[in-house]
Amino acid sequence: MVEARVILERASARLAAASASADDLAHMRVLLEQMDDPQLPREEFNDLDTDFHVAIAQAGGNRLVADLTGAMRTSLRHPLLDAFSRIDDWPPAAEVLRCGHHAIYDAIAARDPDTAEKHTESHIRGFWAAVSPAA
């Protein structure tokens, strides 16, 4: 699942960096601002996280990629919430996730597809490495 997500979301980030509209960027920014609330419960954080990744896919302008991203994120809702619940010290972990989201957004807003792809892959792999049982 991680490999499929990396492939799909790297493509989304690349496409979004090339074609995101001002409205797309504003929507992503609102989601980031909501996620930046340090008091946000984990479940709400997860839902906003999903919305952010889907917003990137939608901003890329490829309907199939956006639909696949939404479906993948829906299928991952419970595993992600389970992973979030296993994190003993949530505030620093949430901050790492927020920083990853901001880095992705900044690259998209700067129209830098290579950096957007790189940050997206790092964000996804970094999270799963941190919460995998072998970690």
Image (tube, rainbow, N blue to C red):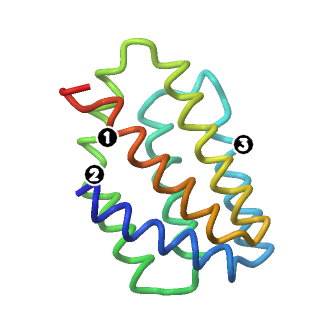
Q: How far across and how far down the image is residue 98, in percent?
A: 60, 38
The residue pinned by badge 2 equals 76
Residue type for callout 1: Leu
Q: Secondary structure at mark 3?
A: helix
Q: Who is closer to the viewer here, 12 or 24?
A: 12
The residue pinned by badge 3 equals 33
Image: 12 above or below 48: below
Q: Is residue 119 left or right of residue 107?
A: left
Residue 95: quarter of image: top right
The residue pinned by badge 1 equals 80
Q: Earlier in the sequence, mark 1 or mark 3?
A: 3
Q: CA distance from mark 2 to mark 1?
A: 6 Å
Q: How far across and how far down the image is residue 128, in percent?
A: 33, 40
Image: 117 above or below 134: below
Within-10-Å neighbours for mark 2: few <14, some 14–19, many 20+: some
Q: CA distance from mark 1 to mark 3?
A: 21 Å
Residue type for callout 3: Glu
Q: Secondary structure at mark 1?
A: helix
Residue at 48% over, 37% down: 44
Q: Is residue 84 left or right of residue 46?
A: left
Q: Secondary structure at mark 2?
A: loop
Q: How far across and how far down the image is residue 16, in percent?
A: 62, 75
Image: 31 above or below 39: below
